[in-house]
Image: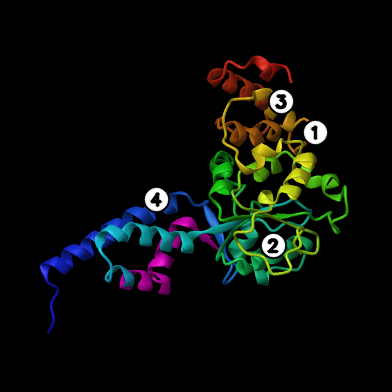
Amino acid sequence: MSSINPKQQSQSNDQQELLAQLLEARSAELPTRLIDTKNGVLVESYQIANLFKNSQEYANLIQHLNSIVFSEWRDLIESSIDNYFSYATLSHRWGYSEPLHKDLQASATHALPPSSGIEKLLRFCAVTRERGFRWAWSDTCCIDKTSSSEVQESINSMFHWYRASGLTIVYLADVAVTEEGVLKRSKWFKRGWTLQELLAPRVIQFYKSDWTSYIPRPDGILATDNDKAVPEFAQLLSEAARVDVKYLTKFTPSTEDVREKMHWVAHRATTKVEDMAYCLCGIFGVFIPILYGEKDRAFTRLQEELLKQSSDLSLFDW
């Protein structure tokens, strides 16, 4: 009967301690819940660590850890966790038949009654899988909008969730062709929330109404293909969004250049009045309580918060 010697036991304990530490840190970066594209089921973020521990990826990781020295553990663990936990986010304009959180609580995506919203979600999940991601996030069904506390947390976390995603997929429902001038006419560039969904992601890909890539790639599309990094397309995005191209690939939230950032949303609109203020919180890196029903008072509170953190008085003159 074999037994584990003290050195092996110590190594195992060190492994588990480091794994627990890194798993906790990565789990904290995830959105509240994600769609498992393997089966179309909503999964709470805290459950994903347990799924990882029961996966073949985890078994392979442990086996590999036992064959390398301690100094190499962290890099291998972080790489394995990132590969498993990485997720794609959807950026789009809401339609009239979007699946909500309660719908996916009761059924998997593929079992929901057909609608244009369901079709969009299914196609998004399919593209997510094709790009090599297991997890998908959509604001339609991954946020429980009946919970005011969850809405508050989600709005304050939204910029970070898009920034931390492995890929953001932009669906342009009103763009069928790639002719000159078509992109800037898309309503996606007229909505308040899509501004941070353009600026936050590190990797972003645009898709037309038939779910083909806006940028033709005859050799296939990789998860790392970043449309914002294509100079000609970045210029088109800049013109359509009215945002200097330098911000598209490298944007850091701050209270600097307030007037310029206010101009970015001057031609945009939101369904709810308050969202014109709330959608800017991630851009400026500030947090204010989310109080739907306060109407224009939300923008006043945003200005007051900006004034606390910036001496730029142009926030009152834009």
Q: Position of residue 205 (x, y in %)?
A: 68, 56
Amino acid type assigned to the residue bearing label 4 in the image: Ala
Specify which label sits upstream in the sequence, 3 or 1: 1
Closer to the eye: label 4 or 3: 4
Magenta-drawn stretch contains 57: yes
Labelled pair 3, 1 in contact (Cβ < 8 Å):
no
Front-most of 243 and 258?
243
| Gap in angstroms between the C-alphas marked 2 and 4 | 29 Å
Amino acid type assigned to the residue bearing label 2 in the image: Leu
Amino acid type assigned to the residue bearing label 3 in the image: Asp
Q: Which residue is mark 4?
A: 25
Colour treatment of the image: rainbow
| Gap in angstroms between the C-alphas marked 4 and 1 | 39 Å
Look at 42% across and 63% down and name the residue there: 80
Instruction: Tell me which segment is drawn in magenta.
Output: 42-63
Q: Secondary structure at mark 4?
A: helix
| Gap in angstroms between the C-alphas marked 2 and 1 | 28 Å
Magenta-drawn stretch contains 47: yes
Mark 4 crowdedness (10 Å alpha carbons): few <14, some 14-19, many ≥20? few
Specify which label sits upstream in the sequence, 2 or 3: 2
Q: Which residue is mark 2?
A: 121
Closer to the eye: label 2 or 4: 4
Mark 1 crowdedness (10 Å alpha carbons): few <14, some 14-19, many ≥20? few
Look at 71% across and 25% down and name the residue there: 296
Q: Quadrant of the N terminus?
A: bottom left
Q: Secondary structure at mark 2?
A: helix
- Is residue 115 among the parts visible in the rendering? yes
Q: Secondary structure at mark 1?
A: loop
Labelled pair 4, 3 in contact (Cβ < 8 Å):
no
| Gap in angstroms between the C-alphas marked 3 and 1 | 17 Å
Specify which label sits upstream in the sequence, 2 or 1: 2
